[in-house]
Each structure stands twice: as structure tokens, then as C-alpha cells.
Amino acid sequence: MKPKPSEFPRTKLLWPWVAPVSVLAFALAAEGAGHAWNVHGNLIALILVFSAALVIGLISLLFALPQAIRMLSRYPSLRTASNFVATGLALAFVGVAMLLILYAFFKVTAS
């Protein structure tokens, strides 16, 4: 039985990067409103919340992406533009998240 294109797990691919992006949007909105970030107070908390959201999103996508790629390769009925866009955005998030984590790791270990 061929699955319908609506049965593709797009929400599993798109939801994990909403939290880190919303943390950044909050920070940019506060910056635009004139908030001065205190390095020893709220900026550290913001960085920790962003990092936690980034790591949780990365882990959940590392579980969801193999399933999505397998479904796309197995069922031609799922190969729609929106499914490919959702998979591509998830892959881009994984790449950017890994680069940010590696950058932070090398920045901490270098000092």
C-alpha cells in the first residue's frame, strides 16, 4: 500500500528548529527594543537556553531524518516538492547546528 504525501513526517522535520530560532528572535527583538545584555547575567542564560534547544533539536532530527530519507527513497508517491523542502531544511539545520557546536567546542578548548 502506497502512503499518501500527507503521511510524510514533515512536522518531525520542521518542528525541532523552531525553538532555537524563537530564542534568537526573542534576543533580536529585545535588542531592537533597546535591551542591554548583561554578560554575567541574562546573556549567559540566553546562550544556555539557545544551546540546549539546539542540542535537543539536533538529537531529535538525527532520529527523524533517516526515517524520512528512507521513506522518500522507498515510496515514489512521497516525492513531492514540499517533502523535499522539509527534508532539505532539516538537513540544513543539522549542518548548521553541528557547525555551531564544533565552533563552540573549539573556542572553549582553545582558550
Image (cartoon, helix red, strand yellow):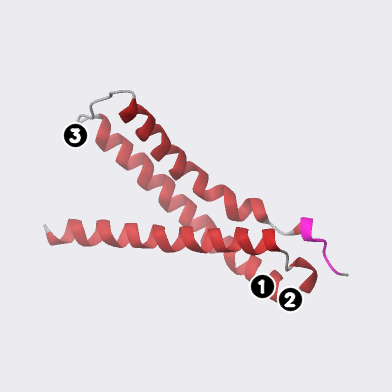
Comes first in the chain, label 3 or label 2: 3
Position of residue 57 relative to residue 71, above or below, is above
Q: How many neighbours does mark 3 have within 10 angstroms: few (below 14), some (14-19), or many (20 or more)? A: few
Q: Which residue is mark 2?
A: 74
Q: Mark 1–mark 3 contact, CB under 8 Å? A: no
Residue type at the position of mark 3: Val
Q: Main secondary structure of the magenta part?
A: loop
Q: Position of residue 108 (x, y in %)?
A: 19, 56
Q: Mark 2–mark 1 contact, CB under 8 Å? A: yes
At a point 57% along the width and 48% down the height, the residue shown is 15
- Cα distance between the residues tagged 2 and 1: 6 Å
Q: Which residue is mark 3?
A: 39
- Cα distance between the residues tagged 3 and 2: 50 Å
Q: Which residue is mark 1?
A: 70
Name the foreground residue: 13 vs 64.
13
Give the left or right position of residue 24, taking residue 61 as reference.
left
At a point 53% along the width and 49% down the height, the residue shown is 16
Q: How many neighbours does mark 1 have within 10 angstroms: few (below 14), some (14-19), or many (20 or more)? A: few
Q: Is residue 53 magenta?
A: no
Residue type at the position of mark 1: Arg
Secondary element type, mark 3: loop
Residue 5 numbered tag: none
At a point 21% along the width and 62% down the height, the residue shown is 106
- Cα distance between the residues tagged 1 and 3: 44 Å
